[in-house]
Image (spheres, coloured by chain):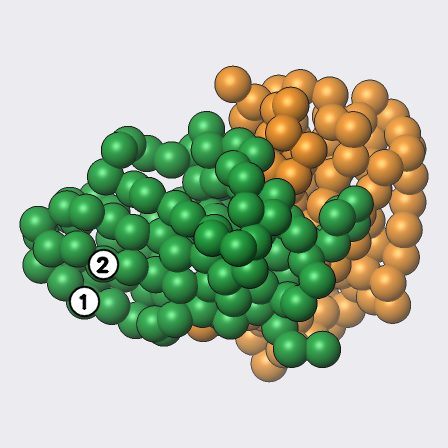
Chain colours: A green, B orange
Amino acid sequence: EAGVTQFPSHSVIEKGQTVTLRCDPISGHDNLYWYRRVMGKEIKFLLHFVKESKQDESGMPNNRFLAERTGGTYSTLKVQPAELEDSGVYFCASSRPLGPTQYFGPGTRLTVL
Amino acid sequence: GQQVMQIPQYQHVQEGEDFTTYCNSSTTLSNIQWYKQRPGGHPVFLIQLVKSGEVKKQKRLTFQFGEAKKNSSLHITATQTTDVGTYFCAGPGGTSYGKLTFGQGTILTVHP
């Protein structure tokens, strides 16, 4: 079974630019989550999809962040315009419909200069 | 909101020594999960505890869930260099069944 994949692995952009992160969950996993870890701090929840619907987006920092999961397969997380404090590692995770285990992807390291 | 505190933040041990990390929640948890993140890697699920007072073992790792379901611990016996990494506890984050609230993590370094 292929794991969760994320693209790109690294992204370096300037403040004010736009970046789109992609996550491909494990096939058959209805639940898809986005998390962010700022250096040295805890992993923070951003949002949760069940199939194509947003179940919980309470962790999204502000309206500069937009997540989509059209068709209930892969998901994108767009940051527009990026700010310095958006730097960190963005993890995507997926899980089976009722399973507790969340399988994390390798993450995208975003650096905003 | 719910907070999950984890201590210590760092732990340096000699290979062969034991290691323990502690997790405390500001609210009662329905369950608690533990994850390990190797340097440069991503969090990997280790275990979930559900019952009050539950103790589970995985080889040299022992996980406990407190009687009040507000605290948990992970104990590693006779650490090895392969144990290095950051250990996170995580609890359900509010009403959303999938959301996890993570502790800050304990960074374990094992000196050979």
Looking at the image, which is closer to me, A49 or B21? A49
Point 23% across, 58% down: residue: A19
Q: Nearer the viewer, mark 1 or mark 2?
A: 2
| Chain that bears disc 1 | A
Label 1 secondary element:
strand
Label 2 secondary element:
strand
Task: Establish if A18 lies above or below B91.
Answer: below
**Residue B2: x percent and y percent?**
56, 22
Asked if the residues shown at circle 1 and circle 2 are in contact, with their CB atoms under 8 angstroms apart, the answer is no
User: Mark 1 packing: few (<14 Cα in 10 Å), some, or many (20+)?
Assistant: few
- Disc number at residue B55? none
Point 34% across, 61% down: residue: A21
**Amino acid residing under circle 1:** Val
**Which label's residue is closer to the chain start, 1 or 2?**
1
Quarter of the picture containing the C terminus of chain B is: bottom right
Point 28% across, 32% down: residue: A62
Task: Establish if A100 lies above or below B2.
Answer: below
Taking the image as shown, residue A6 lies to the left or right of residue A52, namely left
Read off the residue under disc 1.
Answer: A12
- Disc number at residue A19? 2
CA distance for labels 1 and 2: 9 Å
Task: Establish if A94 lies above or below A26.
Answer: above
**Amino acid residing under circle 2:** Val
User: Mark 2 packing: few (<14 Cα in 10 Å), some, or many (20+)?
Assistant: some
Task: Establish if A109 lies above or below B94.
Answer: below
Looking at the image, which is closer to me, A56 or B73? A56
Circles 1 and 2 on the same subunit: yes
Taking the image as shown, residue B54 lies to the left or right of residue A98, namely right
Looking at the image, which is closer to me, A34 or B69? A34
| Chain that bears disc 2 | A
